[in-house]
Amino acid sequence: MSKSADALDKLRDLPSDELRIALARVRDELFRLQLGRHTNQVTSTAEMNGKRREIARILTILRARDLDLEQQGARKRAAKEG
C-alpha cells in the first residue's frame, strides 16, 4: 500500500471531531508556510501543495460523512466481513 493510501486510511479511522481538529492544525501549518514564503524563509513550495491536498482529503471525508456516504472506519469493517 502506498504512503498516501495509508495516510488516507488513518484519516478515515479518526472520529469527525478529531478530523476537524486535524483540519484546523493543517490549515494553520499551511498559513505558516505561506507566511514563510512571503518572508523568503521557505524555498520549497512542494510542502504547501501537500498541505493543500491534505486539507482537501479531510474536507472530502467530512463531507461524505455529512451526506452519510461514509462512516468512520467503514473500509476495515467491510474487509473483515467480506
Image: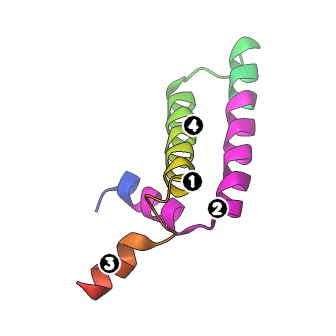
Q: Amino acid under label 1?
A: Asp
Q: Disc 4 vs disc 3: which is toward the camera?
A: 3
Res. 27 image quadrant: top right
Label 4 or label 2, whichever comes before in sequence order: 2
Q: Dot 1 corresponds to which residue?
A: 66
Q: Find residue 42 and report its horizontal and vertical position in percent.
A: 65, 23
Label 3 or label 2, whichever comes before in sequence order: 2
Q: Dot 3 corresponds to which residue?
A: 78
Front residue of this view, candidates 48 and 58:
58
Task: Count residues near mark 3 (Cα–Cα under 10 Å), then give few for <14, some for 14-19, many for 20+.
Answer: few
Q: Amino acid under label 2?
A: Ser
Q: At 55% across and 33% down in the image, what residue appears?
A: 52
Q: Which mark is residue 13?
A: none
Q: Dot 4 corresponds to which residue?
A: 51
Res. 76 image quadrant: bottom left
The residue stretch that appears in magenta: 6-31
Q: At 29% across and 87% down in the image, what residue appears?
A: 81
Q: Amino acid under label 4?
A: Lys
